[in-house]
Image (cartoon, rainbow, N blue to C red):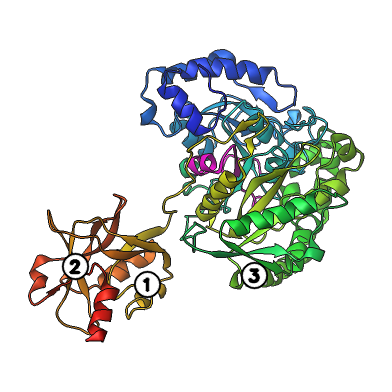
Amino acid sequence: MLPTRLDLATLAAAYRNGLKPSELFAHLHALAAADTHHAWISLLPAAELLARARTLDDQDPAGLPLYGVPFAVKDNIDLAGLPTTAGCPDYAYAPADSAPVVARLLAAGAIPLGKANLDQFATGLNGTRSPYGACRNALQPDYISGGSSSGSAVAVAAGQVSFSLGTDTAGSGRVPAAFNNLVGLKPTCGLLSTRGVVPACRSLDAVSIFALTAADAAAVFGVARGFDPEDAYSREARPHGRRFNACQPFRFGVPRYAQRAFFGDTDNPALFEGAIARLESLGGTCVELDFSPFLETASLLYGGPWVAERYHAIRDFIEQRPGSVFPVTREITLGGGKASAVEAFDAFYRLKAYKRRCDAAWNEVDLILTPTAGRHPTIAAMQADPIRLNTELGHYTNFMNLLDYAAVAVPAAFRPDGLPFGVTLLAPAHQDGPLLELAARWQHSTALPLGATGQPLPEGTAPTSGVPDGMLRVAVCGAHLSGLPLNWQLTQRKARLIGAVRSAPEYRFYALAGGPPLRPGMVRVAEGGASIEMEVWELPASEFGSFVGGIPAPLGIGKVRLEDGSLVSGFICEGAGLTDAEDITHLGSWRRWLASRAGN
């Protein structure tokens, strides 16, 4: 039986219950071929698509992380077997190979249906700037889909694929998510390779991910990311900083009330207030910020020399064949050829100054919440006033890549007119994992339907979890606990407290001889053990070696089993070190033992 929705959890369950990929893809190809939203530029031929799907029919679904998962590729990203048009038929070329980010997904078992429509050369945030047709909103076709990754978003929202790849230079991975009731991940620039992507602004481009759920976006992101030595802008993931889970209260910033722009819309201001209240209910404390430096940064993207990068990307083509370029795209792009080197350096200096002011916000808050877009225009209104309305759409998005931030757009509510309203969670670079984790908690708290299909979030789907790249966890039980003498060895290494835990009831606990500082030892035993109070800390992997190097014998780092059955690196003790040690297992807590000594 075909699944009623295409989120990864539901699809995986359908495959476990006997669904064959070839059955699903025969249905999805017919669905996409009948699409009336102008979501697609080209589809893989049905015979080729079904041949790919049949190669998985007899394989174990557990063997591939994205087994039989259908996806769409924005048509400025190379997919071998279909032309790359960037939304311009005369520009089209046949790539010999798929872009590395696509190749990683293919290797994981995902299957592409085809290439999705876009604002030509990824220039626009509205989805109407395409000779293949203005892409229509998946929920209300008279309204814009958002762009430039228009078709990528609509194909997911309409239930034709499970996820899609877009690109995001100015907001193209977030505005379409908001307008089509999706999750849109705008990752830290460079974590997904942009080799094999037609550049918009090469120094700012990011490959983005659209999905029905934050958990799905996290799963796809985990497969797609990876350092690409052949991409000069690729970078390794770094430690993320902090998390936003239920164990840790956090502070989030919002624009001051007077700085919130909704461009005449009368429903969205109240919906944003509701979003603030929701984030507070998830453990956040709201802090109003002066948003002016963010808006000043945003003005640089199209008002500064970065438009020259768009011109540089297609310079030869647009100069030789200007008539082949969509009129509004041609006007914007040719304007980039007028920027001087002096103007470019002036803008670079201004950006540095703005970034210093914007980054100061991270001394006050852990993340920022904004509307994704102030209002949602109709296609007719956008085509009548394409420059001004497109500029409005970038109000909360254009600064992001200039400042090197990560962001996740999430559905927040439905308006009285039935259109979705979305918000964006943003934080410094490399906070992708924590933001996705918070986005999953957010999404479960809303219980909104997924995409345009009206299907609710799958019951029992767990929020994203785990340790993001570049971080390791360690369980401590003695002098490294919060407020005790050696805790500085963690905090000095930028470690963050995840939470208080207990070990499984299989450890003897001892106060070791010697000191100061006084130290305990945990020894795992087959019987007669107890549950010991501990704390789990998360620290950068780059700091773990020096932390372990400072641990004296008889202590060391091994695997400690926690009360929930999970294993985490933590302090263990050699049995030979227990000479003259005091058995304090009955207390089960280092703090209790310290208090008992103080009482004596």
Where is 295 relative to 18, above or below? below
Q: Residues within 10 Å of mark 3 (few under 14, many from 20)?
A: some
**Which residue was labeled with disc 3?**
361
Label drawn at residue 490: 1
Image coordinates of residue 254 in percent, x first then y, are 70, 62
The C terminus lies in quadrant? bottom left
Could you tell me how far apart the alpha carbons at marks 2 and 3 are, in whole angstroms?
47 Å
Return the x and y of residue 599 as percentages of the image width and height: 25, 85
Percent position (x, y) of residue 592? 27, 74
Q: Looking at the image, which residue is at 54% across and 42% down? A: 217
Image coordinates for residue 371, horizontal then vertical, percent: 72, 53
Query: How many angstroms separate mark 1 from mark 2 (CA)?
Result: 28 Å
- Amino acid on which the number 1 mark rests in the picture: Leu
Question: Helix, strand, or loop for circle 2?
Answer: loop
* Kind of residue at disc 3: Ala
Above or below for 403 versus 7: below
The residue furthest front is 599
Q: Does residue 29 appear to the left or right of 484 in the view shown?
A: right
Q: In the rendered structure, which segment of residues is drawn in magenta?
A: 195-221
Image disc number at residue 398:
none
Q: Is residue 296 above or below residue 325?
A: below
Q: CA distance from mark 3 to mark 1?
A: 25 Å
Measured along the vertical axis of the image, is residue 570 above or below residue 21? Answer: below
Residue 586: mark in rendering: 2
